[in-house]
Image (cartoon, helix red, strand yellow):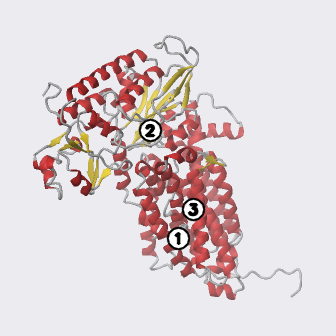
């Protein structure tokens, strides 16, 4: 057996890695973002902003330029967050392909799946005959797949929001692209109001050192990466995030003990009921942390909305506030 | 010796009828497999629609009226290059495996054994991970060079470069002793594998892409990949086939081959380089797909015998067929890496072969 062969992992391992990559979109940090997307309607630049004008040239989160010739009627979404945005803009009926990870809103269950086990089925995407494909950035939709779809003359738009503002910008972006700018503006207004309410509620409060557990796998502890969306969300929610490496989003146990979090939020308990404050206290090395000795280890059941950069991200933000500052929102 | 009289061949070749039957039958099976494999997948396409699309696009015969444009795109731009890619890669790996088993006289030899896989893996891993580690490079890496992606180019160069390094270390006075070659290949592979592991640990979001490459996949094979890999593999294959006499002699052992008049050192070098060329081109477009290059030569040696004049083309066709079937299994199972399929099928088969080898002498090493 050659050493290269030895390198190959057991078949289940990549599946786990892909799963981790797939379920933690907001956690991983990125490097090559081109800032908020921009929209330039070629034909009627000076027309009322709500009137969709095609052909429309869009610049997406990856800095790619895409021209839509008509209002998209058949949309494929390659990420649950994109699906949620389309549905929140009341265009769920235009979706002709989604991922097997999609779980919200309930009606998407009936839509054909073109992403299975985090792998894009390019043939199924082509067979769906979409006039707009909404991909995810940061390799969640692999660059090779984006290139392949683009080469097949499909209109591919890459979305990768890295802050609350960028989620709002992406919602407005999709709204403009699919002729639902009004609905997008309304949705974004509502989100901004709720974020402002959160900021007002937590301003002046103590900011506990907060460790958000994304997952613990084979001794590797995954959390919010330094400078990541999740880290900024914890900050907005009134906590001081204990962050891991920006690239791997993991933190060594020694560094975690040294950081001594005052509050541990168990996001992974959303999926695994065996992860409890008691089981955390029994982990080797964890018992000395202030959060554990003071009993401030909290199960957070809203990991899906906390780590999914879609319209429900504000629900995630509010869930974090309820965990970090119980009562601050006036709803217990 | 009188001029004009051909010297008697040392070994009598296989009967012409048997050769024609084997090769002709093989080609026919491959054609049927091509049509069936193009028809199957996540979107099923009837064989007669496949034939109509192929006939129309390739020969301008008939029309594709009534067939959805998306189906035509799937057949022409996705499945045809993918299935042809499986054939080219399978043929390249199986013929390279046949050559390495003969020249190294080692039944465990496969196309990757002297470092091609480790070198190609390191090249590809660098190509995938570097844009993540050094964001400033992201724009340059996304580009192509002569139509070939940077990852493919680095994999190809890594495979060839590694084997050249291994050969230069292992060469002793014009000779290329098999044991030294194997051990050198192992040592260099270990070093490069450590480099791959190091890059993987620090590759962050690119980790899934690296895993996928290491497991092997034909999902991304496009016409441009085929246009570059096919001529390389074809030239290497024809070069190897034309040296069937040398392969037959080397399978006897270095000393007997030398006694029979073969320039063993030079010939082994030439064969090793040609086989490496085929392997590197295959790996560049598909990643490291295991077992095809190991199992197919053993199987075909049992079926058609050890004469490389027939064994080489037969192995190439069987490798092409098996990889098409393995890739079909990968596609139908919803995206399992093809390397996993070949291992799942190949490993039990190899075990069966080992059991059988207690009765029948296994491989070139006798």
Percent position (x, y) of residue B76?
61, 40
The mark lying in front, picked from 3 and 1, is 3
**Which quadrant of the figure has residue A258?**
bottom left
Image-based side of A315 in relation to A46, left or right: left
Q: How far is mark 3 from mark 1, CA to CA?
A: 14 Å
Percent position (x, y) of residue A45?
55, 15
**Which quadrant of the figure has residue B69?**
top right
> Callout 3: few (<14), some (14-19), or many (20+) C-alpha neighbours within 10 Å?
many
| Residue at image mark 1 | B113
- The numbered disc on residue B238 is none
Give whichever of discs 3 and 1 has the lower sequence position.
1
Near-viewer residue (B248 or B206): B206
The mark lying in front, picked from 2 and 1, is 2
View extreme (right): residue: B3
| Residue at image mark 3 | B158
Q: What element carries label 1?
A: loop
Q: Mark 1 lies on which chain?
A: B
View extreme (front): residue: A204
Q: Which chain carries label 3?
A: B
| Residue at image mark 2 | A137
Q: Do labels 2 and 1 share a chain?
A: no
Q: How far is mark 2 from mark 1, CA to CA?
A: 37 Å
Image-based side of B231 in relation to A268, left or right: right
Q: Badges 3 and 2: C-beta atoms under 8 Å apart?
A: no
Percent position (x, y) of residue B353?
46, 71
Near-viewer residue (A190 or A74): A190
**Which quadrant of the figure has residue A111?**
top left
Percent position (x, y) of residue B5?
85, 81
> Callout 1: few (<14), some (14-19), or many (20+) C-alpha neighbours within 10 Å?
many
């Amino acid at each position: 057996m050659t050493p290269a062969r030895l390198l190959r992992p057991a078949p289940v391992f990549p599946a786990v890695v892909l799963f981790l990559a797939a379920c933690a979109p907001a956690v991983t940090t990125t490097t090559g973002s081109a800032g908020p997307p921009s929209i330039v309607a070629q034909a009627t630049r000076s027309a009322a902003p709500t009137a969709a004008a095609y052909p429309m040239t869009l610049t997406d989160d990856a800095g790619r330029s895409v021209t839509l010739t008509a209002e998209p009627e058949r949309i494929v979404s390659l990420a649950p967050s994109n699906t949620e945005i389309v549905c929140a803009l009341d265009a769920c009926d235009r979706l002709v392909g989604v991922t097997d990870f999609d779980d919200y809103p309930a009606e998407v269950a009936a839509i054909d799946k073109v992403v299975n086990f985090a792998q894009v089925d390019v043939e199924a995407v082509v067979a769906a005959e979409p006039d707009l494909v909404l991909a995810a950035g940061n390799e969640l939709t692999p660059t090779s797949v984006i290139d392949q779809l683009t080469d097949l003359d499909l209109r591919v738009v890459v979305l990768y929001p890295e802050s609350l503002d960028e989620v709002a910008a992406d919602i407005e972006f999709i709204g403009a692209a699919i002729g639902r700018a009004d609905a997008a503006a309304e949705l974004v207004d509502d989100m901004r109001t709720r974020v402002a309410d959160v900021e007002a509620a937590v301003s002046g409060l103590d900011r506990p050192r907060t460790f958000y557990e994304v997952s613990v796998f084979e001794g590797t502890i995954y959390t919010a990466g330094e400078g990541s969306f999740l880290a900024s969300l914890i900050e907005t929610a009134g906590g001081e995030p204990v962050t891991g490496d920006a690239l791997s989003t993991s933190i060594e146990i020694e560094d975690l003990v040294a950081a001594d979090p005052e509050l541990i939020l168990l996001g992974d308990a959303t999926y695994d009921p065996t992860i409890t404050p008691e089981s955390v206290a029994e982990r080797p090395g964890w018992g000395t942390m202030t959060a554990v000795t003071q009993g401030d280890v909290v199960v957070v059941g809203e990991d899906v909305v906390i780590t999914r950069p879609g319209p429900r991200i504000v629900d995630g933000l509010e869930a974090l506030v309820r965990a970090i500052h119980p009562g601050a929102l006036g709803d217990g | 010796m009188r001029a004009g009289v051909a010297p008697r061949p040392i070994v009598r070749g296989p009967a012409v009828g048997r050769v024609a039957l084997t090769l002709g039958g093989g080609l026919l099976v491959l054609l049927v497999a091509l049509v069936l494999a193009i028809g199957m997948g996540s979107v099923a396409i009837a064989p007669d629609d496949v034939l109509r699309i192929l006939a129309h696009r390739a020969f301008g015969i008939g029309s594709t009226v009534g067939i959805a444009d998306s189906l035509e795109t799937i057949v022409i731009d996705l499945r045809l290059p993918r299935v042809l890619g499986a054939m080219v890669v399978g043929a390249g790996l199986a013929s390279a495996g046949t050559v390495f088993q003969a020249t190294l006289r080692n039944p465990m030899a496969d196309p990757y054994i002297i470092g091609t896989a480790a070198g190609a893996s390191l090249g590809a891993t660098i190509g995938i991970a570097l844009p993540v580690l050094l964001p400033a490079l992201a724009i340059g890496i996304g580009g192509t060079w002569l139509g070939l992606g940077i990852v493919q180019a680095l994999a190809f160069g890594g495979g060839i470069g590694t084997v050249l390094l291994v050969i230069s270390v292992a060469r002793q006075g014009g000779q290329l002793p098999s044991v030294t070659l194997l051990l050198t290949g192992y040592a260099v592979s270990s070093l490069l594998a450590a480099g791959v592991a190091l890059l993987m640990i620090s590759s962050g979001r690119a980790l899934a892409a690296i895993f996928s490459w290491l497991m092997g996949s034909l999902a991304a094979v496009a016409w441009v990949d085929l246009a570059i890999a096919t001529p390389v593999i074809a030239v290497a294959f024809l070069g190897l086939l034309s040296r069937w006499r040398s392969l037959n002699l080397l399978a006897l052992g270095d000393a007997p081959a030398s006694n029979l008049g073969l320039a063993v050192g030079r010939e082994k070098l030439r064969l090793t380089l040609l086989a490496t060329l085929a392997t590197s081109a295959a790996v560049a477009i598909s990643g490291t797909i295991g077992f095809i290059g190991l199992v197919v030569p053993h199987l075909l040696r049992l079926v058609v015998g050890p004469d490389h004049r027939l064994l080489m083309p037969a192995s190439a066709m069987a490798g092409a067929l098996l990889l098409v079937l393995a890739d079909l299994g990968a596609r139908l199972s919803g995206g399992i890496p093809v390397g996993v399929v070949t291992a799942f099928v190949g490993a039990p088969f190899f075990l069966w072969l080992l059991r059988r080898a207690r009765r029948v002498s296994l491989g070139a090493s006798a």
